[in-house]
Image (cartoon, rainbow, N blue to C red):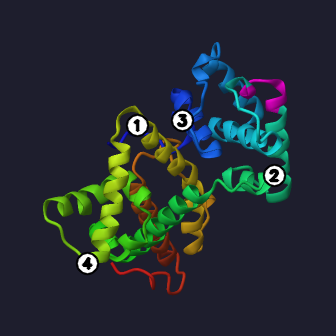
Amino acid sequence: MYPKHGLLEDSEEADIRGVFEACHRTVFGRKTIRGVHRLPDFKDQIVSGATKARCPISLYCLTIMLAHKRLNPDREFFPSFLISDTAIQRVGRYRDAAIEEYGAFDLSHLNLLTKSDNTSLRNNMLHSEIAAGTWIIGWKIRHKGDALTEFYAQNELSLDPLWLATESTYMETVYKPHIKTPNGTKEIQRHRFRVSKVLQQLGRGTKGTRHIEHLFLVRRWIMADAIKSSLRYYGFQPQDFEAENKPVLDCMKLWRRIALAIQHWYCLQHFEGVPNALKNLVL
């Protein structure tokens, strides 16, 4: 039920077919008619295109698909459109325009450039991830022990059912115990019923597997923005920290590690004589 998709770009090259189909579903709202695997040497060609365009494979595919939808809304999108010189040049133009206008080239700025409205799923997932990040960081800075039970008790209703369906800690902490012994208010039970409907859809054979891949891909896309927003809330930026360049397989563990790093920073400030450096900590 919970495939270990890395939340960074490292896993994309291993499953380009899944990335392509998830991107196609995001942009066009349906499954592709022709799979990318029909292209000769499709993996090498798409990796080469993304490398030349200097961007992750998912962003490369999304840029070309969104540009096609904007310029040719009535024309079918074919996988061969990903590997032409024109496609690589188009991604380069969008990348340069995004960097010039916004200082970065990522999914958020791509949506601004293309005026894409295919963002509701992303926004809902991002809202839930930021809620998780800011709350868990704040709790762990000030408390010892596990934060998950209290986190879900206070925030469950504000978290999107699709996000909850991708989070294994929710399954173990809340959902599975609820299935054995239903509990909570009527509103809580209705929310958990929505989660159960999502899980039913995700469990329906090959189609369900693709939906799972799509959800995890979206969650990967939003992690960078979630981290930036959560750190900004506490007065930090990603570049304030050092981390190993490894895929993130457990988002909740990541938020707890970020909280620990911030806690250590406050302690270091205290030892360096910064007044009131520990005022935000309860040790």
Name the residue that disc number 3 marks: 10
- The amino acid type found where label 4 is placed reads Thr
Q: Residue at x 38, y 72 (%)?
A: 157
Separation (CA) of disc 4 from disc 3? 42 Å
Q: Earlier in the sequence, mark 2 or mark 1?
A: 2
What element does badge 1 sit on? Answer: helix
Q: Given this view, does label 4 or label 3 mark the residue nearer the observer?
A: 4
Separation (CA) of disc 4 from disc 2? 48 Å
Q: Given this view, does label 1 or label 3 mark the residue nearer the observer?
A: 1
What element does badge 2 sit on? Answer: helix
Q: Earlier in the sequence, mark 4 or mark 3?
A: 3
Q: Residues within 10 Å of mark 2 (few under 14, many from 20)?
A: some
- Magenta part of the protein: which range? 81-88
In this orientation, does residue 55 appear?
no
Residue 260: image quadrant is bottom left
Separation (CA) of disc 1 from disc 3? 20 Å
What element does badge 4 sit on? Answer: loop
Depth check, front residue: 4 or 84: 84
Q: Is residue 280 left or right of residue 47?
A: left
Residue 113 screen position, x and y as percent: 79, 53
- The amino acid type found where label 1 is placed reads Thr
Depth check, front residue: 150 or 1: 1
Numbered tag placed on residue 185 in the rendering: 4
Q: Earlier in the sequence, mark 1 or mark 3?
A: 3
Q: Earlier in the sequence, mark 2 or mark 3?
A: 3
Name the residue that disc number 2 marks: 99
Separation (CA) of disc 2 from disc 1? 35 Å
Q: Is residue 103 left or right of residue 164?
A: right
What element does badge 3 sit on? Answer: helix
Q: Residues within 10 Å of mark 3 (few under 14, many from 20)?
A: some
